[in-house]
Image (tube, rainbow, N blue to C red):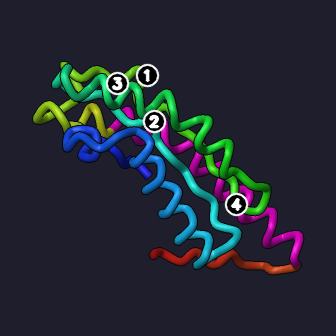
Amino acid sequence: MHLGTNDVVYGQSITSILAAFTTLVQQMRASNANIKIIVAQIIPISYAQWNTGNIALNAAIPSWASGLNSTASPIFVVDQYDGFDASTDLRDGIHPNTAGDTKTAAKWYPALVQAINLVTQEAEQSGKREVEFVAY
């Protein structure tokens, strides 16, 4: 999940954004109690008046994720903010350009591999030879 920029821009509080994230996690877990969730600390944007909200949201995400984390359904937090340059990695001040996409992909990849490895280990431990991935 890389969510929250629009919420910040439209004036939602950090509390309400995290409550919406919690609802999403609950909905995902209702569909699959063993889902592995990857959540971003979101990228910066070029507009300082809103980027401060991104920074505040990012500061709150690790403790929010920790509070909902479970062995069966871990939440991995990926810091997409650090190392992302709003002046060179955005095409329109908000959305990543090719360089920004490359940076975010490089940060998503280790968490994705870790989540896939967990699913694979669980399948092997249960005697399954294949792992079913379902897109929702």
10 Å crowding of disc 1: few (<14), some (14-19), many (20+): few
Q: Which residue is mark 1?
A: 82
Do the residues under discs 1 and 4 have CB atoms within 8 angstroms? Answer: no
**CB atoms of marks 1 and 3 within 8 Å:** yes
Q: Which residue is mark 3?
A: 84
Decide if residue 72 is on the left or right side of residue 88: right
**Residue at coordinates 68% horizontally, 72% vertically from top-left?**
33
> Circle 2 sits on which residue?
41
Q: Which residue is mark 4?
A: 73
**What amino acid type is highlighted by mark number 1?**
Asp
Q: Position of residue 59 (x, y in %)?
A: 49, 27
Is 119 inside the magenta-drawn segment? yes
The quadrant holding residue 53 is top left
Q: Nearer the viewer, mark 1 or mark 4?
A: 4
* Overall secondary structure of the magenta section: helix
Bounds of the magenta segment:
102-126
